[in-house]
Amino acid sequence: MSVFQRHAGQHGEVLNVESVAVPDIVRAVGTPVYVYSKRHFEHQYAAVSNAIAGCGTDTRICYAVKANSNLSVLRVFADLGAGFDIVSGGELARVMAAGGDPARVVFSGVGKTTEELDLALKLGIDCFNVESVAELDRLATRAELLSRPARIAIRVNPDVDAATHPYISTGLKENKFGVPAATAIDLYRKAASHPALVPAGIACHIGSQISRPDPMIEALNKLLDLVDALADEGIELTHLDLGGGYGVRYREEAEFDIGAYGARVRAALQGRQLSLSVEPGRFLVANGGLLVTRVEYLKPAAETAGRQFVVVDAAMNDLIRPALYRAWHGVEGVGVPGDGAIDGIWDVVGPVCESGDFLARERRLTVAAGDLLAVTSAGAYGMAQSSNYNTRPRPAEVLVDGDTFRVIRRRETPEDLYRHELAAAPGGPR
Ligand code: LLP
Protein backbone atom coordinates (compact mmCIF):
# COMPACT_ATOMS: atom_id res chain seq x y z
CA MET A 1 0.00 0.00 0.00
CA SER A 2 1.37 3.41 -0.85
CA VAL A 3 -0.27 6.52 0.46
CA PHE A 4 1.93 8.53 -1.89
CA GLN A 5 0.53 8.63 -5.42
CA ARG A 6 0.71 11.01 -8.34
CA HIS A 7 -2.56 12.51 -9.51
CA ALA A 8 -3.37 14.91 -12.29
CA GLY A 9 -3.73 18.44 -10.97
CA GLN A 10 -4.20 21.86 -12.46
CA HIS A 11 -0.54 22.01 -13.48
CA GLY A 12 0.04 18.38 -14.43
CA GLU A 13 0.76 15.40 -12.21
CA VAL A 14 1.53 16.17 -8.58
CA LEU A 15 2.47 14.06 -5.61
CA ASN A 16 -0.39 13.42 -3.19
CA VAL A 17 -0.30 12.20 0.39
CA GLU A 18 -3.48 10.20 0.77
CA SER A 19 -5.96 12.56 -0.93
CA VAL A 20 -4.11 15.81 -0.35
CA ALA A 21 -1.89 17.40 -3.01
CA VAL A 22 1.50 18.32 -1.56
CA PRO A 23 1.52 21.82 -3.18
CA ASP A 24 -1.69 22.62 -1.27
CA ILE A 25 0.11 21.88 1.98
CA VAL A 26 3.09 23.98 0.93
CA ARG A 27 0.84 26.89 -0.01
CA ALA A 28 -0.57 26.87 3.51
CA VAL A 29 2.52 26.00 5.52
CA GLY A 30 5.63 26.79 3.46
CA THR A 31 8.83 24.79 3.24
CA PRO A 32 10.65 22.86 4.52
CA VAL A 33 7.83 20.80 5.96
CA TYR A 34 7.49 17.26 7.22
CA VAL A 35 4.29 15.62 5.97
CA TYR A 36 3.00 12.40 7.53
CA SER A 37 0.23 10.01 6.57
CA LYS A 38 -2.04 8.83 9.35
CA ARG A 39 -3.27 5.97 7.19
CA HIS A 40 0.25 4.67 6.70
CA PHE A 41 0.85 4.68 10.46
CA GLU A 42 -2.38 2.78 11.04
CA HIS A 43 -1.60 0.31 8.29
CA GLN A 44 1.84 -0.48 9.69
CA TYR A 45 0.50 -0.79 13.23
CA ALA A 46 -2.10 -3.27 12.01
CA ALA A 47 0.60 -5.28 10.22
CA VAL A 48 2.62 -5.68 13.42
CA SER A 49 -0.47 -6.29 15.50
CA ASN A 50 -1.65 -9.07 13.18
CA ALA A 51 1.81 -10.60 12.97
CA ILE A 52 2.22 -10.96 16.72
CA ALA A 53 -1.42 -11.82 17.54
CA GLY A 54 -1.57 -14.95 19.65
CA CYS A 55 2.14 -14.94 20.48
CA GLY A 56 2.10 -15.48 24.21
CA THR A 57 -0.57 -14.89 26.81
CA ASP A 58 -0.95 -11.27 25.79
CA THR A 59 0.70 -9.04 23.21
CA ARG A 60 1.50 -5.37 23.12
CA ILE A 61 3.11 -2.96 20.70
CA CYS A 62 5.15 -0.35 22.56
CA TYR A 63 5.81 2.34 19.98
CA ALA A 64 9.41 3.59 20.28
CA VAL A 65 8.79 7.27 20.90
CA LYS A 66 12.27 8.28 19.76
CA ALA A 67 11.48 7.54 16.11
CA ASN A 68 8.91 10.32 15.80
CA SER A 69 7.79 11.94 19.00
CA ASN A 70 5.29 14.53 17.79
CA LEU A 71 2.34 14.54 20.19
CA SER A 72 -0.17 13.99 17.40
CA VAL A 73 1.78 10.98 16.14
CA LEU A 74 1.84 9.56 19.67
CA ARG A 75 -1.89 10.23 19.85
CA VAL A 76 -2.50 8.17 16.70
CA PHE A 77 -0.77 5.21 18.31
CA ALA A 78 -2.39 5.74 21.73
CA ASP A 79 -5.78 5.65 20.00
CA LEU A 80 -4.82 2.34 18.41
CA GLY A 81 -4.13 0.95 21.88
CA ALA A 82 -0.34 1.12 21.76
CA GLY A 83 1.97 1.23 24.71
CA PHE A 84 5.17 3.22 24.49
CA ASP A 85 8.89 2.51 24.73
CA ILE A 86 10.61 5.55 26.20
CA VAL A 87 14.25 6.42 26.88
CA SER A 88 13.95 9.66 28.82
CA GLY A 89 11.80 11.66 31.20
CA GLY A 90 11.14 13.98 28.29
CA GLU A 91 9.64 11.16 26.26
CA LEU A 92 7.54 10.15 29.26
CA ALA A 93 6.24 13.72 29.52
CA ARG A 94 5.35 13.59 25.82
CA VAL A 95 3.46 10.33 26.24
CA MET A 96 1.46 11.87 29.09
CA ALA A 97 0.81 15.06 27.12
CA ALA A 98 -0.46 12.96 24.23
CA GLY A 99 -2.90 11.13 26.50
CA GLY A 100 -0.90 7.88 26.61
CA ASP A 101 -1.39 5.42 29.43
CA PRO A 102 1.63 5.23 31.78
CA ALA A 103 0.60 1.70 32.72
CA ARG A 104 1.57 0.69 29.18
CA VAL A 105 4.99 2.33 29.19
CA VAL A 106 8.36 0.55 29.28
CA PHE A 107 11.46 2.57 30.09
CA SER A 108 14.69 1.61 28.28
CA GLY A 109 18.10 3.29 28.22
CA VAL A 110 21.48 3.06 29.93
CA GLY A 111 21.45 6.39 31.75
CA LYS A 112 18.20 6.89 33.62
CA THR A 113 18.65 9.72 36.12
CA THR A 114 17.20 9.74 39.63
CA GLU A 115 14.69 12.39 38.55
CA GLU A 116 13.60 10.28 35.61
CA LEU A 117 13.23 7.15 37.76
CA ASP A 118 11.18 9.12 40.31
CA LEU A 119 8.86 10.52 37.65
CA ALA A 120 8.31 7.08 36.15
CA LEU A 121 7.73 5.50 39.58
CA LYS A 122 5.20 8.16 40.55
CA LEU A 123 3.33 7.79 37.28
CA GLY A 124 3.31 4.02 37.70
CA ILE A 125 4.83 2.88 34.43
CA ASP A 126 4.60 -0.78 33.55
CA CYS A 127 8.24 -1.80 33.50
CA PHE A 128 11.81 -0.56 33.85
CA ASN A 129 14.19 -2.25 31.43
CA VAL A 130 17.28 -2.21 33.63
CA GLU A 131 20.65 -2.06 31.92
CA SER A 132 23.28 -2.26 34.70
CA VAL A 133 23.98 -3.30 38.29
CA ALA A 134 24.24 0.33 39.36
CA GLU A 135 20.90 1.18 37.77
CA LEU A 136 19.19 -1.68 39.59
CA ASP A 137 20.62 -0.42 42.88
CA ARG A 138 19.47 3.13 42.19
CA LEU A 139 16.01 1.99 41.17
CA ALA A 140 15.68 -0.17 44.29
CA THR A 141 16.60 2.79 46.51
CA ARG A 142 14.17 5.15 44.82
CA ALA A 143 11.32 2.63 44.69
CA GLU A 144 11.71 1.91 48.39
CA LEU A 145 11.92 5.58 49.30
CA LEU A 146 8.79 6.44 47.33
CA SER A 147 6.99 3.25 48.45
CA ARG A 148 6.31 2.42 44.80
CA PRO A 149 7.35 -1.12 43.93
CA ALA A 150 8.95 -1.27 40.50
CA ARG A 151 8.35 -3.98 37.95
CA ILE A 152 11.61 -4.69 36.21
CA ALA A 153 12.98 -6.51 33.22
CA ILE A 154 16.70 -6.94 32.75
CA ARG A 155 17.84 -5.88 29.31
CA VAL A 156 20.05 -8.71 28.23
CA ASN A 157 22.72 -8.17 25.63
CA PRO A 158 22.43 -11.43 23.70
CA ASP A 159 25.61 -10.84 21.67
CA VAL A 160 23.85 -11.33 18.38
CA ASP A 161 24.97 -9.72 15.16
CA ALA A 162 22.02 -7.82 13.73
CA ALA A 163 23.93 -7.19 10.49
CA THR A 164 23.07 -3.50 10.37
CA HIS A 165 24.94 -0.17 10.40
CA PRO A 166 27.44 -0.19 13.32
CA TYR A 167 25.92 3.00 14.78
CA ILE A 168 22.48 1.37 15.07
CA SER A 169 23.57 -2.08 16.22
CA THR A 170 22.86 -2.51 19.93
CA GLY A 171 23.09 -6.21 20.76
CA LEU A 172 26.77 -7.04 20.34
CA LYS A 173 28.89 -7.53 23.42
CA GLU A 174 30.98 -4.46 22.56
CA ASN A 175 27.86 -2.25 22.61
CA LYS A 176 27.00 -0.26 25.73
CA PHE A 177 23.50 -1.69 26.02
CA GLY A 178 22.18 -4.33 28.39
CA VAL A 179 24.15 -6.89 30.41
CA PRO A 180 25.45 -10.36 29.54
CA ALA A 181 23.38 -13.39 30.54
CA ALA A 182 25.54 -14.23 33.59
CA THR A 183 25.18 -10.71 35.01
CA ALA A 184 21.46 -10.84 34.30
CA ILE A 185 21.06 -13.89 36.55
CA ASP A 186 22.79 -12.08 39.41
CA LEU A 187 20.55 -9.07 38.87
CA TYR A 188 17.38 -11.17 38.95
CA ARG A 189 18.51 -12.82 42.19
CA LYS A 190 19.12 -9.41 43.68
CA ALA A 191 15.77 -8.09 42.47
CA ALA A 192 13.90 -11.14 43.73
CA SER A 193 15.20 -10.56 47.22
CA HIS A 194 14.44 -6.85 47.28
CA PRO A 195 11.07 -5.79 48.71
CA ALA A 196 10.62 -2.87 46.29
CA LEU A 197 11.48 -4.72 43.07
CA VAL A 198 9.35 -7.15 41.11
CA PRO A 199 11.25 -9.25 38.57
CA ALA A 200 8.57 -9.38 35.91
CA GLY A 201 10.19 -9.70 32.53
CA ILE A 202 13.19 -9.97 30.33
CA ALA A 203 14.12 -7.63 27.50
CA CYS A 204 16.55 -7.23 24.64
CA HIS A 205 17.12 -4.91 21.72
CA ILE A 206 19.69 -5.92 19.17
CA GLY A 207 19.62 -3.06 16.72
CA SER A 208 17.63 -1.16 14.19
CA GLN A 209 16.86 -1.50 10.46
CA ILE A 210 17.23 -5.30 10.67
CA SER A 211 16.35 -6.93 7.39
CA ARG A 212 15.61 -10.52 8.42
CA PRO A 213 13.91 -12.20 11.39
CA ASP A 214 16.84 -14.59 12.01
CA PRO A 215 18.96 -12.50 14.43
CA MET A 216 15.85 -11.64 16.45
CA ILE A 217 14.87 -15.28 16.71
CA GLU A 218 18.43 -16.12 17.77
CA ALA A 219 18.15 -13.45 20.48
CA LEU A 220 14.73 -14.74 21.50
CA ASN A 221 16.08 -18.26 21.98
CA LYS A 222 18.91 -16.97 24.14
CA LEU A 223 16.40 -15.09 26.26
CA LEU A 224 14.23 -18.20 26.63
CA ASP A 225 17.25 -20.19 27.87
CA LEU A 226 17.61 -17.57 30.56
CA VAL A 227 13.91 -17.65 31.41
CA ASP A 228 14.24 -21.41 31.94
CA ALA A 229 17.40 -21.09 34.02
CA LEU A 230 15.67 -18.55 36.25
CA ALA A 231 12.53 -20.68 36.57
CA ASP A 232 14.77 -23.48 37.87
CA GLU A 233 15.76 -21.12 40.69
CA GLY A 234 12.15 -20.22 41.40
CA ILE A 235 12.21 -16.85 39.62
CA GLU A 236 9.21 -17.00 37.28
CA LEU A 237 9.17 -14.28 34.66
CA THR A 238 5.87 -13.55 32.98
CA HIS A 239 6.86 -11.09 30.32
CA LEU A 240 9.16 -10.90 27.32
CA ASP A 241 10.08 -7.65 25.57
CA LEU A 242 11.53 -8.54 22.18
CA GLY A 243 13.26 -5.45 20.85
CA GLY A 244 14.96 -5.26 17.51
CA GLY A 245 13.85 -2.87 14.85
CA TYR A 246 12.20 -4.30 11.74
CA GLY A 247 13.81 -2.85 8.63
CA VAL A 248 11.99 -0.74 6.08
CA ARG A 249 12.63 -0.11 2.42
CA TYR A 250 14.51 3.12 1.76
CA ARG A 251 15.88 2.09 -1.62
CA GLU A 252 15.83 -1.50 -2.80
CA GLU A 253 16.04 -3.32 0.54
CA ALA A 254 13.75 -6.31 0.85
CA GLU A 255 10.61 -5.59 2.85
CA PHE A 256 10.98 -7.11 6.35
CA ASP A 257 8.73 -10.18 6.41
CA ILE A 258 6.71 -9.33 9.50
CA GLY A 259 4.35 -12.28 8.97
CA ALA A 260 7.21 -14.80 8.92
CA TYR A 261 8.71 -13.14 11.98
CA GLY A 262 5.40 -13.43 13.85
CA ALA A 263 5.05 -17.09 12.94
CA ARG A 264 8.51 -17.89 14.24
CA VAL A 265 7.99 -15.95 17.47
CA ARG A 266 4.66 -17.73 17.95
CA ALA A 267 6.30 -21.12 17.49
CA ALA A 268 9.10 -20.26 19.93
CA LEU A 269 6.67 -19.07 22.62
CA GLN A 270 4.17 -21.90 22.14
CA GLY A 271 3.08 -23.43 25.43
CA ARG A 272 4.84 -20.83 27.56
CA GLN A 273 3.13 -18.54 30.02
CA LEU A 274 4.76 -15.39 28.73
CA SER A 275 3.23 -12.17 27.47
CA LEU A 276 5.04 -10.48 24.59
CA SER A 277 5.78 -6.89 23.79
CA VAL A 278 7.68 -5.48 20.83
CA GLU A 279 9.05 -1.97 20.46
CA PRO A 280 9.05 -0.87 16.84
CA GLY A 281 9.69 2.72 15.88
CA ARG A 282 10.96 2.98 12.32
CA PHE A 283 8.70 0.27 10.91
CA LEU A 284 5.60 2.16 12.03
CA VAL A 285 6.53 5.61 10.78
CA ALA A 286 9.52 5.79 8.39
CA ASN A 287 7.70 5.30 5.13
CA GLY A 288 4.75 7.40 6.24
CA GLY A 289 6.69 10.66 6.07
CA LEU A 290 8.15 13.07 3.52
CA LEU A 291 10.35 16.07 3.97
CA VAL A 292 9.20 18.59 1.39
CA THR A 293 11.71 21.23 0.39
CA ARG A 294 12.01 23.96 -2.22
CA VAL A 295 14.89 24.40 -4.64
CA GLU A 296 16.57 27.73 -4.01
CA TYR A 297 19.39 27.60 -6.52
CA LEU A 298 21.00 25.37 -9.10
CA LYS A 299 24.78 25.18 -9.45
CA PRO A 300 25.22 23.31 -12.72
CA ALA A 301 28.50 21.75 -13.84
CA ALA A 302 29.30 24.72 -16.06
CA GLU A 303 30.00 26.83 -12.97
CA THR A 304 31.50 24.21 -10.63
CA ALA A 305 34.55 21.99 -10.83
CA GLY A 306 32.47 19.04 -11.96
CA ARG A 307 29.69 18.08 -9.57
CA GLN A 308 26.31 19.71 -9.90
CA PHE A 309 24.37 20.93 -6.90
CA VAL A 310 20.71 21.50 -6.23
CA VAL A 311 20.63 23.82 -3.23
CA VAL A 312 17.38 23.36 -1.32
CA ASP A 313 15.90 25.03 1.74
CA ALA A 314 16.12 21.89 3.92
CA ALA A 315 19.43 20.83 5.39
CA MET A 316 21.28 18.40 7.61
CA ASN A 317 19.80 20.09 10.67
CA ASP A 318 16.33 19.06 9.44
CA LEU A 319 17.29 15.53 8.34
CA ILE A 320 20.67 14.35 9.55
CA ARG A 321 20.48 10.70 8.48
CA PRO A 322 22.36 11.14 5.18
CA ALA A 323 25.17 13.09 6.88
CA LEU A 324 25.33 10.87 9.95
CA TYR A 325 24.97 7.38 8.51
CA ARG A 326 25.32 8.05 4.79
CA ALA A 327 21.71 6.92 4.75
CA TRP A 328 19.97 6.89 1.38
CA HIS A 329 16.65 8.71 1.03
CA GLY A 330 14.74 8.97 -2.21
CA VAL A 331 14.32 12.43 -3.73
CA GLU A 332 11.62 13.17 -6.28
CA GLY A 333 9.99 16.17 -7.82
CA VAL A 334 6.61 17.00 -6.31
CA GLY A 335 5.16 18.32 -9.57
CA VAL A 336 6.11 18.93 -13.16
CA PRO A 337 9.59 20.54 -13.33
CA GLY A 338 9.50 24.32 -13.78
CA ASP A 339 10.53 26.31 -16.85
CA GLY A 340 14.18 25.97 -17.77
CA ALA A 341 14.56 22.73 -15.80
CA ILE A 342 17.88 20.97 -16.30
CA ASP A 343 18.16 17.22 -16.53
CA GLY A 344 21.30 15.79 -14.96
CA ILE A 345 23.02 14.05 -12.09
CA TRP A 346 22.78 16.25 -9.02
CA ASP A 347 23.84 16.39 -5.40
CA VAL A 348 20.95 17.71 -3.30
CA VAL A 349 22.47 19.92 -0.62
CA GLY A 350 21.29 22.36 2.04
CA PRO A 351 22.46 25.82 3.08
CA VAL A 352 24.37 24.69 6.20
CA CYS A 353 28.07 25.48 6.31
CA GLU A 354 29.36 21.90 6.33
CA SER A 355 30.45 19.77 3.41
CA GLY A 356 28.53 16.95 5.07
CA ASP A 357 25.32 18.87 4.53
CA PHE A 358 23.72 16.80 1.83
CA LEU A 359 20.37 15.07 1.58
CA ALA A 360 21.21 12.98 -1.47
CA ARG A 361 24.12 12.48 -3.82
CA GLU A 362 24.38 11.72 -7.50
CA ARG A 363 20.70 11.56 -8.32
CA ARG A 364 19.18 11.87 -11.74
CA LEU A 365 16.70 14.75 -11.58
CA THR A 366 15.11 17.19 -13.97
CA VAL A 367 14.91 20.27 -11.84
CA ALA A 368 14.51 24.04 -11.87
CA ALA A 369 14.94 26.68 -9.19
CA GLY A 370 11.63 27.06 -7.36
CA ASP A 371 10.62 23.41 -7.76
CA LEU A 372 9.39 21.41 -4.81
CA LEU A 373 11.23 18.19 -4.00
CA ALA A 374 10.10 15.43 -1.66
CA VAL A 375 12.65 13.51 0.39
CA THR A 376 11.06 10.14 1.00
CA SER A 377 11.06 7.71 3.95
CA ALA A 378 11.52 10.64 6.32
CA GLY A 379 8.90 9.73 8.95
CA ALA A 380 11.39 8.11 11.37
CA TYR A 381 14.43 9.75 12.93
CA GLY A 382 13.88 12.83 10.78
CA MET A 383 12.27 15.60 12.83
CA ALA A 384 13.17 13.59 15.95
CA GLN A 385 16.89 14.09 15.25
CA SER A 386 16.64 17.64 13.95
CA SER A 387 18.56 20.52 15.45
CA ASN A 388 18.80 24.28 15.19
CA TYR A 389 22.36 24.32 13.87
CA ASN A 390 23.08 27.54 11.97
CA THR A 391 20.15 29.02 13.91
CA ARG A 392 17.75 27.40 11.53
CA PRO A 393 14.19 27.23 12.80
CA ARG A 394 12.96 23.67 12.48
CA PRO A 395 10.31 22.75 9.90
CA ALA A 396 6.60 22.60 10.46
CA GLU A 397 4.99 19.15 10.69
CA VAL A 398 1.71 18.22 9.04
CA LEU A 399 -0.46 15.15 9.47
CA VAL A 400 -2.65 14.11 6.57
CA ASP A 401 -5.83 12.17 7.24
CA GLY A 402 -7.78 11.30 4.10
CA ASP A 403 -8.55 14.54 2.29
CA THR A 404 -7.66 16.83 5.18
CA PHE A 405 -4.44 17.92 6.81
CA ARG A 406 -3.49 19.55 10.07
CA VAL A 407 -0.39 21.42 11.22
CA ILE A 408 0.75 19.33 14.16
CA ARG A 409 3.77 21.49 14.90
CA ARG A 410 4.12 25.03 13.74
CA ARG A 411 7.31 26.20 12.13
CA GLU A 412 9.77 27.64 14.64
CA THR A 413 10.71 31.28 14.52
CA PRO A 414 14.21 32.65 15.22
CA GLU A 415 12.82 34.07 18.49
CA ASP A 416 11.85 30.55 19.56
CA LEU A 417 15.50 29.65 19.24
CA TYR A 418 16.99 32.31 21.50
CA ARG A 419 14.07 32.67 23.91
CA HIS A 420 16.03 31.02 26.73
CA GLU A 421 19.11 33.14 26.32
CA LEU A 422 20.07 36.40 27.98
CA ALA A 423 19.53 39.30 25.63
CA ALA A 424 22.74 41.24 25.01
CA ALA A 425 21.02 44.29 23.55
CA PRO A 426 21.50 47.59 25.40
CA GLY A 427 19.02 47.76 28.25
CA GLY A 428 18.44 44.02 28.18
CA PRO A 429 19.21 41.67 31.08
CA ARG A 430 22.93 41.01 31.68
N1 LLP B 1 13.77 0.15 21.54
C1 LLP B 1 15.02 0.48 21.88
C2 LLP B 1 15.51 0.16 23.22
C3 LLP B 1 15.84 1.15 20.95
O1 LLP B 1 17.08 1.47 21.27
C4 LLP B 1 15.33 1.47 19.66
C5 LLP B 1 16.15 2.18 18.68
C6 LLP B 1 14.00 1.09 19.37
C7 LLP B 1 13.26 0.43 20.33
C8 LLP B 1 13.36 1.37 18.05
O2 LLP B 1 14.02 0.74 17.00
P1 LLP B 1 13.42 0.82 15.52
O3 LLP B 1 12.16 0.01 15.48
O4 LLP B 1 13.16 2.23 15.21
O5 LLP B 1 14.48 0.24 14.68
N2 LLP B 1 18.75 7.15 14.54
C9 LLP B 1 18.91 5.89 13.85
C10 LLP B 1 18.17 4.77 14.55
C11 LLP B 1 18.61 4.56 15.98
C12 LLP B 1 17.80 3.51 16.67
C13 LLP B 1 18.20 3.38 18.10
N3 LLP B 1 17.34 2.56 18.90
C14 LLP B 1 18.49 6.06 12.39
O6 LLP B 1 18.12 7.16 11.99
O7 LLP B 1 18.56 5.10 11.63
Image (tube, rainbow, N blue to C red):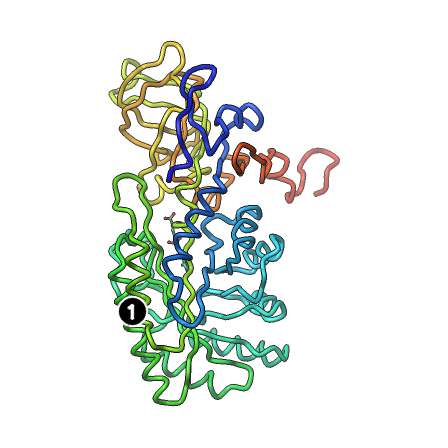
Q: Quadrant of ligand 1?
A: bottom left
- Which residue is rendered at x = 45% and y = 72% of the image? 130
Q: Which residue is mark 1?
A: 267
Location of residue 61 by image quarter: bottom left
Asked if residue 172 is positioned above or below residue 188 in the image, the reply reads: above
**Front one among 118 and 233:** 233
**Front one among 404 and 190:** 404
Residue at the right extreme of this rendering: 427
Given the image, on which type of amino acid does mark 1 rest? Ala
SS for dot 1: helix
**Front one among 400 and 94:** 400
Asked if residue 329 is positioned above or below residue 119 in the image, the reply reads: above
Residue 162: x percent and y percent? 27, 59
Q: Residues within 10 Å of mark 1 (few under 14, many from 20)?
A: few
* Quadrant into which the N terminus falls: top left
Residue 277 shown left or right of residue 97 in the figure: left
- Which residue is rendered at x = 53% and y = 32% of the image? 403
- Which residue is rendered at x = 42% and y = 59% of the image? 279
Residue 4: x percent and y percent? 41, 33
Asked if residue 146 is positioned above or below residue 294 in the image, the reply reads: below
Residue 19: x percent and y percent? 49, 31
**Front one among 365 and 166:** 365
Residue 187: x percent and y percent? 41, 81
* Quadrant into which the C terminus falls: top right
- Which residue is rendered at x = 37% and y = 89% of the image? 233
Q: How many marks?
A: 1
Residue at the top extreme of this rendering: 340
Does ligand 1 reach within 8 Å of label 1's beta carbon? no
Residue 12 shown left or right of residue 258 in the figure: right
